[in-house]
Image: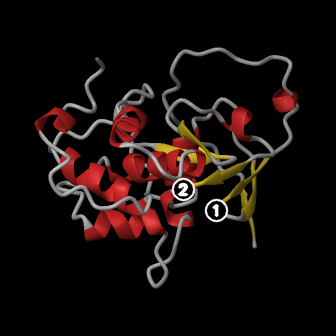
Amino acid sequence: MQCTLSEPVTCRLLQGTIDMASSALTGEPVVLTVNGTTCSVDLPRDTKLIYVLRNDLGLNGPKFGCGLGECGACTVLIDGVAARSCVVTLRTVEGRSVTTLEGLGELTALHPVQAAFIAAQAAQCGYCLNGMIMTTVAFLARNPAPTLEQVREALRYNLCRCGTHVEIMRAVMAAAGVRAIEDGVGADDVAMSAPR
């Protein structure tokens, strides 16, 4: 399946550095793969990835939170690495593979991390879930048998304002196949998002 976008996107761009050595200033469409589908996007190369994903491709997994790459709600995987789509430009993802929450699994065949988050009821409002799940997928690919401290460290920059940190920690450990943490998650773990 091929998708082609050519309508201009109006967005407020944040100040950032531009890689002038990139071939991104040629005026040719940007080609990237999103959830296994090759897309040719004829938009300014400074367009933030989140705008293309949400507004043009209709993928609403990544949430717009802070717009500064601080909260994690917009996290996607770029070549398997967790990245904040609100600060990543089309130039950065040209020729690369982007995976959103929608690309992890299907309603009838959830990704193990998605299934673990549902089983642990690791959501209240759900706004942070995209970032928590996508960061967890990338983290578990690197560290399939983490300790509780490693999970806490991996998720510390993903913000959850509802306070479901204990359930999130349980979900991550369950997704890793580590015995469910019955009494091992306590009040200290609720502060996992706060830098130490």
- Is 25 in front, or is 104? 104
**Residue 134 falls left or right of residue 163:** right
Question: Residue 144 appears at what percent x and percent y?
Answer: 53, 52
Residue at image position (55%, 47%) is 138
Q: Position of residue 72 (x, y in %)?
A: 40, 37
The residue wearing badge 2 is 100
Q: Is residue 184 visible?
A: yes
Instruction: Tell me the quadrant of the picture where the N terminus can be found.
Output: bottom right
Among all residues in the image, which is located at the extreme left? 187
Q: Which mark is residue 63?
A: none
Q: Quadrant of residue 177?
A: bottom left
Measured as percent of width and height from the top left, residue 42 is found at: 75, 46
SS for tag 2?
loop
| Dots 1, 2 in contact, CB < 8 A | yes
Callout 1: helix, strand or loop?
loop
Q: Is residue 187 above or below residue 63?
A: above
Q: Which residue is mark 1?
A: 35
Q: Which residue is located at x 24 percent, y 40 percent?
A: 160
| Placement of the C terminus among the 4 image quadrants | top left
Q: Amino acid at mark 2?
A: Thr
